[in-house]
Amino acid sequence: MVYYKTEEEVELIRQSCLLVCKALAQVASLIRPGVTGLEMDIVAEELIKDHKALPAFKGYRGFPNTLCISTNDQVVHGIPTNEEFKDGDIVSIDCGTYMNEFFGDSAYTFALGEISPETLQLLEVTNTSLYKGIAAATAGQRIGDIGFAIQNYCEKTYNYGVVRELVGHGIGRSLHEAPEVPNYGKRGRGAKLKEGLVIAIEPMVNNGKKEVKQLDDGWTIASKDGTLAAHYEHTICVQKEKAIILSDHRLIESEIAKNSNVNKIAIRTAELANV
Ligand code: MG
Ligand code: MG
């Protein structure tokens, strides 16, 4: 069942998404080599609860924390630990909130300290592919057009591996609603996109082959070949001319700009998504 949202519902989802991005922005201001994932997790949980909202992932199917923190070859669903981040780590952080009966979902990959140009390119390309996917998400287009835009850019242009096992999703009163939004696909295939459809688009891209494995903790997904992986996610609402991006990475990026321990990736987002 696909639920199309009213303007009021879209606004509530936006509020939940903005809280996610505030939490990620707080993390962006603090993250550096020497801090731990669990420290970031506590900061995010407190900020969310201060806004009378709930962390959406904590307790979801038994997930223990507020943030999914996935470092280096880990793609998604990493459990925060008390291990310190190191210089040269890339750290993907995914966060969800539940507020006023609606969910928000967004993710960002941070590059700490000394990072190779090759790694920065992986982050830039994955981030850019997210906006290419968003640009394809207009009414009348199909789910496959979103996946095609992401896959074509990441795999054809850059030879990266786009993860198949995990996908984007509808979002609203549930964290994961229909439809699934794969990061791969064929143009003109899949369900037609209509105004009011709210979806999370979230490319997960490996600097190697597309295959992934699950770690023994039962949660963490990592690239099978051990190559680095990046993950960026926005929640968006499909409209006629151009999608509305409900989450706001500018909140995160303005904190990164002030944090000398985090690398700035080239951000060519708004123009790409035509938003
Ligand atoms: Mg997410
Ligand atoms: Mg998601």
Image (cartoon, rainbow, N blue to C red):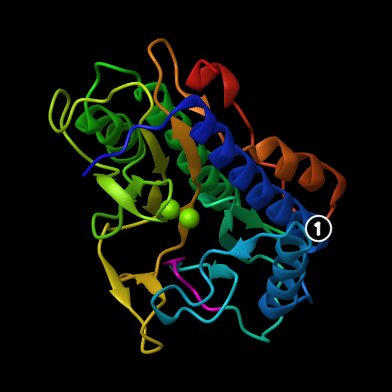
Q: Position of residue 15 (x, y in %)?
A: 64, 41
Does any atom of ligand 1 lie closer than 8 Å to the CB of label 1?
no
Segment tinted magenta in the rendering: 75-79
Mark 1 belongs to which amino acid? Asn
**Closest to the observer, 138 or 98:** 98
Residue occupying the point 25% across, 63% down: 211
**Apparent side of residue 108 relative to residue 260 in the rendered image (left or right):** left
Residue occupying the point 31% across, 38% down: 3
Local packing at callout 1 (Cα closer than 10 Å; few below 14, some 14-19, many 20+) is many
Q: Is residue 69 visible?
A: yes
Q: Position of residue 58 (x, y in %)?
A: 54, 74
**Apparent side of residue 181 relative to residue 77 in the rendered image (left or right):** left
Task: Indicate the quadrant where residue 196 lies.
Answer: top left
Give the answer, above or below, for where 78 lies relative to 170. Answer: below
Residue occupying the point 25% across, 40% down: 2
**Apparent side of residue 113 relative to residue 223 in the rendered image (left or right):** right
Q: Quadrant of the C terminus?
A: top right
Q: Is residue 113 visible?
A: no
Give the answer, above or below, for where 203 lies relative to 219. Answer: above
Q: Quadrant of the N terminus?
A: top left
**Closest to the observer, 146 or 180:** 180
Q: Residue furthest top?
A: 241
Q: How many marks?
A: 1
Give the answer, above or below, for where 86 lies relative to 204. Answer: below
Which residue is tagged 1?
Answer: 261
Element marked by disc 1:
loop
**Closest to the observer, 156 or 45:** 45
Residue 47 is covered by the magenta coloring:
no
Q: Position of residue 253 (x, y in %)?
A: 72, 41
Query: What is the chief secondary structure element of the magenta stretch?
Result: loop
Q: Position of residue 35 (x, y in %)?
A: 77, 75
